[in-house]
Image (tube, rainbow, N blue to C red):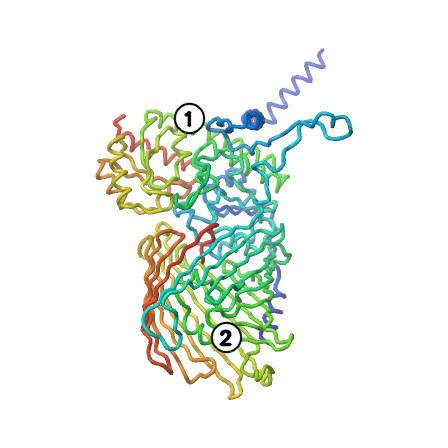
Amino acid sequence: MRQTRFALAALVAATLVAAPRDAAAQAAGQAQQIQQQIDQLRREFNDRLGALEAQLAAMQGGQPAPSPPAQPPAAPPTTTVDVPPGAAGAGGPSGPLPVYGAATAGSKIFNPDMAVIGDFLGAAGRNRVDPQPALEMHESETSFQAIVDPYARADFFVSFGQEGVELEEGFLTLTALPGGFLTKVGKLRAAFGKVNTLHNHVLPWTDRPLVTRNLVGGEEGIDDAGISVSRLIPAGTLFLEATGEVYRGDSAESLFRSSTRGDLAYVAHLRGYHDITESTNVDLGASYSYGHNPSGIVGGVDLGRFTTNLFGVDATLRWRPLTRAIYHQFVGRSEVIWSDREQFEGRQRSMGYYVSGDYQFARRWWVGGRYDRSERAEDASLFDRGGSAILTYWPSEFSQVRGQYRHTRYADAPDANELLFQFQFSIGAHGAHPF
Amino acid sequence: MRIFTLLLALVLALPIGAFAQAKLNVVTTTEDLGALAREIGGDKVTVAALAKGYQDPHFVDPKPSFILAVSRADALIVVGRELEIGWLPPLLTSSRNSRIQQSGKGYLDASSNVRILEIPTGQITRAMGDVHPLGNPHYWLEPGNGRRIAQSIRDKFSELSPGNAAYFAQRYGDFDTRLAAAEKRWDAAMAPYKGTKIVTYHRSWPNFMERFGLEVMGYVEPKPGIPPSPSHTIELIDEMKRQGAKLIVVEPYFDLKTPQSIATQVGGKVLVLAPSVGGTKEATDYIQLFEYDVNQLAASLKQITGK
């Protein structure tokens, strides 16, 4: 008896000494535990209730019973049926069985995110070098995007254009490789500069700059089957990313053409990005590309074995004040590209660039301008230049209307003054905002 | 060609950015989740939030600096319900971090056990504006949901760092107690105004207004994500006059011109509230966020209703 009392006293003392501070926390912990139990019971009750209601509704064959308001989002009720009479006791399943193929099932849920973006172009004025039709459904880009498995995702962009259907991009991205490598395999727009990586619908213009047309294969650009590996380079707060890509060697009409399996094309890109302030940032890049060009091909045989080296630097300055991000922003961008192309007539070293600025001055309005100047890849003595003024209106995030006045001074043709206009519209899954 | 090989070799030779740290490196998409992660994680975690509290969480640029942050994260906590659909997927893809992919152990969708309002039923189309098919994603603006998010965070942290489970549980208990005490205060402050009709700019406040008994009778936006139109504004003014609504609550990232002109027409008032931690400099953590919003709201309602 005395021993018991002593032990009790010791216990009480120990508790008092050891955990006076924890008492409150303990009480709170217990309260929390009880709360959890209540929550758990409530959830179970709701699930069971939902299941019973669904069962009742199924029996009545009518509308599902109205669920009580203000219910936490319980898991969708699972419909069940009883094991058919006679089946029980034969070693088969017992108790209620879930009904598959009910409203919650179906393989549809694994369908990829789909979207279609329409790009309608119109042109007025005269252009002898690059005549566009007066009206055209320039492109309908369909995208299918989904996660493949825990290690990869896949993205397909199929473009239905005036000339037919083309796989613009279709690639697998391995997101879980060790060593910090981001690997893409498939048909890709190469990481050469900025414009080459962008799909038509995210460009701030209705067209692509002259330098793209003259030196980097035009609208198609460097877009080929290949493998891309990129990695972040540790550099403190600076974002530094290096990308290396290997392609089959067939891009655009005039750019790269492979005659043998060994005629691969290569792209390397280094990107640096830095936040100057929370609303201003700078994005710099350097690019290199190499491949066999088609100028040495005579009668289907690559006699010349000529190659092209492309070098590029790009710079983007963005300003977007965070508290007014949906009303105002500015993007200034420039790319300079050098082409070093071997030909029968000798080596052609050409250079071209564009400088552009786009300013969002109201929630739905953008104004922009672009200056272009580029020599021709095949003949560096010829150069074209031009300027554009652009006005864009966004009724919503999913559509836009754009007008562009473009003046082009061609080296070997009369000047072109054109008014281009564009309607773009997107249906389906919400795509990521371009950056 | 030779340049290319050289570059490739250089890149391959660089050390991997391994970030083995004692502290759990947590990245959250918003400052609210960041604040709750700090409540639970204390000094056992470092927390970085991507979007600022004063910016529209629907329209955040997926900046490469965010890729850097996400690439080093042990845990990523997202609001979910498609709030971040325009900017989070490219960050995840470029993060090169399997821990915080959706299949990873470090990924936490904070909406998994909270109470979601305005889940659309039946066919939805974009004719309804930028609707969220999985329900209203502004669910953190209700203390009960805050508590549930904190529970999810506690469980996730305990799973990632089992040695600190007791610490996280104790921090949660402490937060829970402080929140419960604060809730009593807020309820008392808002009690006189139960049933008062108000207007908000965007549908950011259903959980908040329901919790504190205010009735949202209209929106400055004609449809979610669609900027105000003259015809809708006129209708709204008439409706506000008819129903006697005088207060217009606006998020800090919207233009005040239309709300101001509506307020002038109906003889009411525009009130900018913080929809997120960091939305105003007073809203330094989750409890302070409500402290600020409730005090502002009660003061304005007092002025308007005279109660």
Q: State the image coordinates of residue B137 (x, y, percent, origin top left).
A: 45, 40
- SS under mark 2: strand
Q: Is residue A17 above or below residue B137?
A: above
Visible residue check, residue A360: yes
Decide if residue B47 is on the left or right side of residue A416. right
Q: Is residue A371 left or right of residue A101?
A: left
User: Foreground mark, 2 or 1?
Assistant: 2
Question: Tag 2, which chain?
Answer: A
Q: Which residue is mark 1?
A: B184
Q: Depth check: B167 or A3 in front?
A: B167
Question: To which chain does the residue with label 1 belong?
Answer: B
Using the rendered image of the protein, determine whether residue A33 is visible from the camera's viewpoint. Answer: no
Looking at the image, residue A338 sits to the left or right of residue A54; the answer is left
Report the amino acid beneath label 2.
Answer: Phe
Could you tell me how far apart the alpha carbons at marks 2 and 1 are, in whole angstroms?
66 Å
Residue A137 shown left or right of residue A231 in the figure:
left
Q: Point out which mark residue A311 bears.
A: 2
**Residue B105 drawn at (x, y percent):** 61, 45
Q: Residues within 10 Å of mark 2 (few under 14, many from 20)?
A: many
Quarter of the rendering occupied by the N terminus of chain A? top right
Residue at the far top in the pictured view: A1
